[in-house]
Amino acid sequence: MTLLPIIAAVALLVLLIAAGKVPPFVAFIIAALAAALMLGMPLAKIPGSIEKGIGDLLGGLAGVIVLGAMFGKLIADSGAAQRIAESLISLFGQKRLPIAMTATGFIVGIPLFYNVGFVLMVPLVFSITYRAKLPAIYVGMPLFAGLSIAHGFLPPHPSPTALVTQFNANLGLTLIYGLIVGIPTLLIAGPLFATTLKGIVVKPSALFKPSETKSADLPGAFNSFACALLPVVLIAATTALAYWPGIDPNTKSLLTLVGNPTIVLLVSLAIAAVTLGTARGKPLREVMDGFGGAIRDIAAILLIIGGAGALKQVLVDSGTDAQLAAMLGGLPIPPLLLGWLLAFAIRIALGSATVAGLTAASLIRPLVLAGHANPNLMVLAVGAGSLMCSHVNDSGFWMFKEYFGLSLRDTFRSWTAMETIVGTFGLGFVLLLSLWV
């Protein structure tokens, strides 16, 4: 039976990562090899299948993810992220502070990878807490909800970008749909949920006692916002214009080139390197050193994505994908809900949202390619499932607990609940959107 080897391979993957602490890339390769053997693939074809899977998935993603990491690093190092936060807080005022923090997390979360955004924003949360004399969780939770939603739903973050490739989705449409789904989800999981957390007492480390940063040393607000949002604006605009009625074929070809994610990020990176870097007196060498650090930081994620490609390709080359599509298509569960459930189950077992999303994508991919679900919405449904129920096997859970000095009970009550709200309402809004697109 085809299903048993797949279950066994996924179980092996979970066991290797969760119990054996094997690096995810190695665990994916072992699981792909085990699946190939159990599915009866010819021995001589197995190495080629694994190599093809790694290369094919990384081929279209490496440039986007590496350039995205460099771009986010520059936004952080230049002070643009801090300027965005200060501008939004000034605009909304203290009474609407949760709304300001929600917008900060979401906007800063678009260019910044999750862990970078988390570490960068924690001191800001405590700085505001000291000044405004408000509960730290009440102030911080909307910001972290924004970071989480950007991480799970929006390209060019690694997981949604990889899922776009897996499902042959349109990156621009996925980004637009992600904004449509992400904004109402954020309002619920951020400022609304934060009102229930005012009673939680935090014990932060003295490390986070704020030190004043001179506003004159930060880039301007317009420059900061324009650079941070430029990739989103370019991708969304070129995607929308490409669907304009009666558009000239040559213009459409130009839009396809300009709207390519790699080109968009390359252009955005070049503009930001000048306006946030050299034009403000930062030596070019220092800017380039920051880019080098970003590449080192993203290497592990690239390896995880490559490993997931190996498992996917084994399912394709063994013919299992067609059988899996037929079997999953016959289940009395809507495909979008099924993709969400698969990612949810793997997230609970492994902790990593990226691994959960990519593993679920390998399983649900045949169903999407067979035309049973909108590929752009499936990216979001799997992304929502991969964010569910963060608990003790997730590094984000422990980062939040230790940075805020919380008990396990309060961490579950705040962090885990927020991630679960994001995953649940994210799915709900995806299903609602599926009624119209």
Image (tube, rainbow, N blue to C red):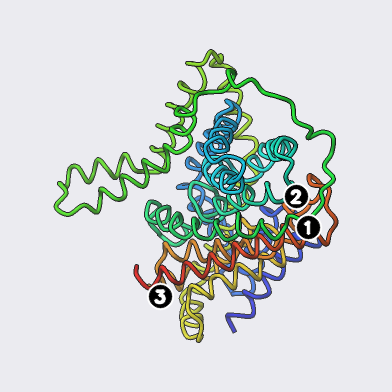
Q: Earlier in the sequence, mark 3 or mark 1?
A: 3
Residue nearest the viewer, comparing 207 with 46: 207
Instruction: Count residues near mark 1 (Cα–Cα under 10 Å), then give few for <14, some for 14-19, many for 20+.
Output: many
Q: Looking at numbered disc 1 in the image, what kind of residue is underneath it?
A: Thr
**Dot 2, crowdedness within 10 Å: few (<14), some or many (≥20)?**
some
Mark 2 in CB contact with mark 1 (< 8 angstroms) = yes
Mark 2 residue element: helix
- Residue indicated by mark 1: 411
**Residue, x 40% and y 31% (percent of image)?**
267
Rendered view: 167 above or below 326: above
Which percent across, then down, holds residue 225? 47, 34
Mark 3 vs mark 1: give the one in front: 1
Residue hosting label 3? 372
Amino acid beneath label 2 = Phe
Label 3: few (<14), some (14–19) or many (≥20) C-alpha neighbours in 10 Å:
some
Question: Horizontal and vertical percent for residue 293?
Answer: 63, 30
Real-space CA distance between mark 2 and mark 1, rounded to the nearest whole angstrom: 7 Å
Left or right: residue 308 compared with residue 223: right
Amino acid beneath label 3? His
Q: Where is residue 59 in the image (x, y as percent from the top left)?
A: 47, 47
Nearer mark to the viewer, of 3 and 2: 2
Numbered badge on residue 400: 2
